[in-house]
Image (cartoon, rainbow, N blue to C red):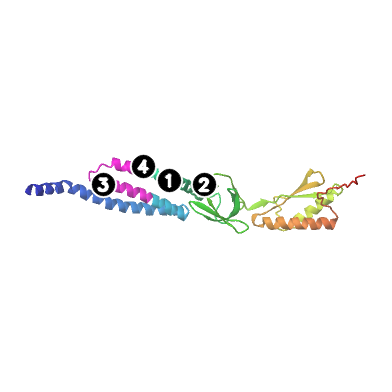
């Protein structure tokens, strides 16, 4: 019995310092890790990183460092941490394969948030869908279509294709084509089109509108009309000019050709 007591006393004396050091490593390490997470969050916010992404990255850093601290504390107790590190690595690899799609969306979300090809409020066309951006998160992007549908797109589909942003520039060019008959006066038609376009105060003077003959088509002489407007006025000006151009053509006696088919009827002789 005395031998057992002596053995326990010897063991306690032998490992007491390691136990104390392990506890110190654990306590001090956790304090340092929390400080690093706090600093990382402040740095991300200072660099205008999205709040959701900032919290996510700070938590990733925190989880990694906590794992390092626990492994260091266990190693101080004399436990072989080589196998433990291998197990953690294998588990991380397995989780990575299981969450491959989610990680791809996350990586794409990080790219979108950092490089900002679009932000909330922009009208974009991505992954075959056009709409206003309502929300950008680390895993998906939410669009609202013009007919009021809510579309949720995985971020990996967005970064995997082309991104068309209709809102990022302050001005846009409207591309219109108007056809007149071959018997109409080209100069008069061009003057009418110029008058309709330049009379709209929303049309910018610089760059100047382009009005020119585009092609001699099968049944019409087609003019291209390209005024520049502020992006916010694009569709209003588009619709208004189209309507006013038809009204002015009618008032000036300028014809707008339309497809016609001649039908010939033959009476069969008996």
**Residue tagged 4:** 90
Q: Earlier in the sequence, mark 1 or mark 4?
A: 4
**Residue tagged 2:** 156
Chief SS of the magenta region = helix
Distance, label 1 to label 3, CA atoms, is 29 Å
**Residue tagged 1:** 98
Checking the image for residue 74, the label placed there is 3
Are circles 3 and 2 on residues that touch, CB within 8 Å?
no
Q: Is residue 235 left or right of residue 138?
A: right
- x and y, in percent, of residue 6 in the image: 9, 48
Which dot, 4 or 3, sits closer to the camera? 4
Q: Is residue 258 magenta?
A: no
Distance, label 3 to label 2, CA atoms, is 39 Å
Distance, label 2 to label 1, CA atoms, is 16 Å
Are circles 2 and 1 on residues that touch, CB within 8 Å?
no
Q: Earlier in the sequence, mark 3 or mark 2?
A: 3
Q: Residue at x 59, y 57 (%)?
A: 149
Distance, label 4 to label 3, CA atoms, is 19 Å
Q: Is residue 106 left or right of residue 86?
A: right
**Camera sees residue 197:** yes
Q: Nearer the viewer, residue 51 or 15?
A: 15
Q: Earlier in the sequence, mark 1 or mark 3?
A: 3
- x and y, in percent, of residue 12 in the image: 15, 49
Which dot, 1 or 3, sits closer to the camera? 1
Start and end of the magenta stretch? Answer: 61-89
**Camera sees residue 198:** no
């Amino acid at each position: 019995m005395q031998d057992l007591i002596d053995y326990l006393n010897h063991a306690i004396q032998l490992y007491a310092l390691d136990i104390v050091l392990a506890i110190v490593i654990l306590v001090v390490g956790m304090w340092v890790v929390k400080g690093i997470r706090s600093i990382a969050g402040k740095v991300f916010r200072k660099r205008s990183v999205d709040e959701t992404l900032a919290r996510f990255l700070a938590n990733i850093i925190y989880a990694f460092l906590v794992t390092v601290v626990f492994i260091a504390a266990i190693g101080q107790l004399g436990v072989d941490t080589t196998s433990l590190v291998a197990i953690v690595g294998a588990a991380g690899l397995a989780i990575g394969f299981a969450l491959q799609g989610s990680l791809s969306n996350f990586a794409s979300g990080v790219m979108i948030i950092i490089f900002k090809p679009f932000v909330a409020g922009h009208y974009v066309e991505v992954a075959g869908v056009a709409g206003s951006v309502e929300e950008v998160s680390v895993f998906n992007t939410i669009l609202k279509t013009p007919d009021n549908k809510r579309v949720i797109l995985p971020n990996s589909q967005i970064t995997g294709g082309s991104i068309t942003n209709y809102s990022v520039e302050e001005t846009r060019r409207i591309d219109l084509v108007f056809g007149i008959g071959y018997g109409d006066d080209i100069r008069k038609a061009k003057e009418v089109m110029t008058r309709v376009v330049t009379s709209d105060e929303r049309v910018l003077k610089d760059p100047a509108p382009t009005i020119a003959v585009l092609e001699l088509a099968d049944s019409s002489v087609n003019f291209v009309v390209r005024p520049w407007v502020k992006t916010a006025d694009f569709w209003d000006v588009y619709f208004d000019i189209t309507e006013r151009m038809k009204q002015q053509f009618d008032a000036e006696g300028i014809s707008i050709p339309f497809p016609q088919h001649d039908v010939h009827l033959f009476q069969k002789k008996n």
